[in-house]
Amino acid sequence: MNIMRYYIIRIQVDFETPREMPPLPSSGKQWRSIGYFQTFYCTEKSTEKAKQLVRDFYRKNEINPDACKFRFEHSVWMRGITRIEQLSMVSHELTEEIFGKRDQIGIWFIGEMEHYVSEADYAASMDEEMIDKDLDL
């Protein structure tokens, strides 16, 4: 008998070349992302099948998948998940409606892309912030 299992799968995608990102409300400046993390909740019969669901989603939805380095950062089988409260600490975007789809094979939750910057860009933004603070004094 094949039993459905629930999985949390987190991926990391590194871009071949940095991508220009729209300004954040806090800064108002464009910035460059070198990649992102993304979390998926899915139901399948095995870890490999669950990973394949996520890999297929990535290939279909990434702007230029061949110009990225894709890897699975984390894959966890969630045992005994029966209430949304058991996952509320993991994801604040998870709703009862989405959670109700967990018994269907497939991806039932897709987290936001969590973009990140290079160390050099981060250091440069910190330097800019310090200069801006000095000018405000």
Image (cartoon, rainbow, N blue to C red):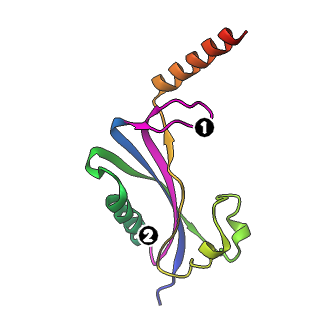
Q: Position of residue 95 (x, y in %)?
A: 65, 69
**Looking at the image, is mark 1 or mark 2 earlier in the sequence?**
1
Q: Residue furthest left?
A: 66
Q: Residue at x 52, y 36 (%)?
A: 23
Q: Is residue 29 on the magenta stretch?
A: yes
The amino acid type, in three-letter code, at marker 1 is Pro
The disc placed on residue 50 is: 2
Residue drawn 40% across and 47% down? 13
Residue 32 figure quarter:
top left
Q: Which residue is mark 1?
A: 25
96 vs 131: above or below:
below
When the figure is inspected, residue 1 is found, relative to residue 25, above or below; the finding is below
On the rendered structure, is 121 left or right of 19? right
**Which segment did they paint magenta?**
19-46
Dominant secondary structure of the residues highlighted in magenta in the image: strand
* Residue 48 percent across, percent down from the top left: 40, 68
Estimate the spatial distance between the alpha carbons at disc 1 and disc 2, rounded to whole Å.
35 Å
- In the rendered image, residue 11, in percent from the top left (x then y), is placed at 45, 53
On-image quarter of the C terminus: top right
Please say whether residue 41 is one of the residues in the magenta stretch: yes
Residue 77 in picture, x, y percent from top left: 55, 68
Amino acid of disc 2 = Ala
